[in-house]
Image (tube, rainbow, N blue to C red):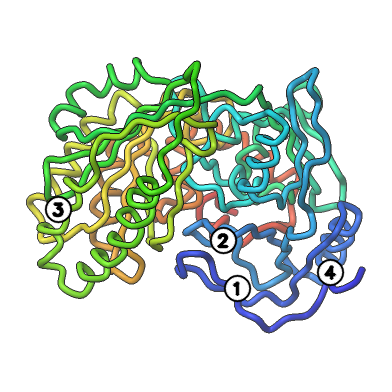
Amino acid sequence: MTDTYARTTSTWRNWAGTVTARPARIASPASVDELVDVVLRARADGLRVKPVGTGHSFTSTAATDGVLIRPDLLTGIRDIDRTRMTVTVEAGTPLKRLNTALAREGLSLTNMGDIMEQTIAGATATGTHGTGRDSGSISAQIRALELVTADGTVRVCSPEEDPEVFAAARVGIGALGVITAVTLAVEPVFLLTAREEPMSFDRVTADFDALVAENEHFEFYWFPHTGNCTTKRNNRSAGPAAPPGRASAWVDDELLSNGVFRVACALGRAVPATIPSIARLSSRALSTRTYTDIPYKVFTSPRRVRFVEMEYAVPREHAVAALREVKAMVERSPLKISFPVEVRTAPADDMTLSTASGRDSAYIAVHLYRGTPHRSYFTAVERIMTAHSGRPHWGKIHTRDAAYLSGVYPRFGEFTTLRDRLDPDRVFGNDYLRRVLGD
């Protein structure tokens, strides 16, 4: 192997700058066989192994002082099966490349998150999701996966083959092995019509159940220090395609949502007293718009303002109560919150450690501009979410441990028992996994 297993003294950082690590070695295997060799050599040397994608997790899921595996060479589509309507893709493939490649083939994922910089393995390992009445996370669209375990075995898992591992590894948080490929369900490319519309906090919370029931994909953002929200409804359309005009898209998605917003966040970080006024202006700046395009161009948007984030999944019937508690907490506290709060939904699924495992879920995500002290705000929000049996997103900031998580995940013990069998020596362990899964 050329340059696939080299010593390094470089420091790895995640996208948000919240996690750093100094691995002993970095590996960039170009095949599954090379990856197996990396794992076995690391194990023989007493080093732990962690794969890393693009670093979009805010937690230290990928941090290691052992061997850091970069999947840059494990990319591309292996196979498209138009009979079964699946695509098999290498683990290191960025979602952006996957989405554009599928579109060229006249295909699409059913649902996706709102950014597409992550690798497919990194996104699914942490349970990355969008919003959907009937369709769940990217992991829920996996039909099979290939996994290299601690003893070098290459396992192919599906509902029919190794179903116990399949149920756990689709959201495996890097604890069971290194995923090298996933097979995803796809469908013929379709059109989505997006309607973005301002709405009051009182109205959107009063009508939340109806808005979720009436739309295939519904989400909204509440601007703290205001009673204002912006909503987004995505539904399938017969067409024709009517994407935003180039000029209006630039104004909404780049100038306002990135350029002006970055300046506002920087001003708010420097002078927190300005934040409520900025929030009132920001919440009125985005007007109603409707456009129709292929799915990934509707689901996703550019996110150039860096931030830190915490997100909890609560039972969907608790969403409004939890959000109202967050609003009341912000209003009675001295906190100044520059970022809107995001609310999305997902149907129940059957994955062991999915945040939607066994229950219809609503996601409440809080953000702050990178560099802004976040502990007081996130701690207060986390206290509310845990009172509603909230499950933290595996890739976003939280303080929960195995004692708590075992109480909100009915199948938690099933996952840890499987981990004991597949990785008894914790080749894929790190401090984060020790906290959330225990020893």
Residue 303 visible within the image = yes
Q: Which residue is mark 1?
A: 12
- Which mark lies nearer to you, 1 or 3? 3
Q: Are marks 3 and 4 in contact (CB under 8 Å)?
A: no
The quadrant holding residue 345 is: top left
Name which residue lies at 74% across and 60% down: 72
Seen from the viewer's position, the closer of residues 210 and 180 is 210
State the SS at label 3.
Answer: helix
- Point out the tag, 1 or 3, that comes first from the N-terminus: 1
Residue 83 or residue 402, whichever sits in front? 83
> Which residue carries the number 4 mark?
4
Q: Secondary structure at mark 2?
A: loop
In the rendered view, tell whether residue 42 sits above or below residue 210.
Answer: below
Extreme residue in the bottom direction: 9
CB within 8 Å, label 1 to label 3: no
Residue 111 appears in which quarter of the rendering?
Answer: top right
The answer for how far apart the CA atoms under marks 3 and 4 are is 51 Å
Q: Position of residue 364 (x, y in %)?
A: 33, 40
Q: Quadrant of the C terminus?
A: bottom right
Q: Position of residue 126 (x, y in %)?
A: 56, 46
Q: Is residue 416 visible?
A: no
The first of marks 1 and 2 along the sequence is 1
Left or right for 49, reference 135: right
Which label was assigned to residue 55? 2
The residue located at (74%, 33%) in the rendering is: 183
Q: Amino acid at mark 2?
A: Gly
Q: Which residue is mark 3?
A: 281
Q: What residue type is disc 3 on? A: Leu
Q: Amino acid at mark 1?
A: Trp
Q: Would residue 197 be found to the left or right of residue 248 on screen?
A: left
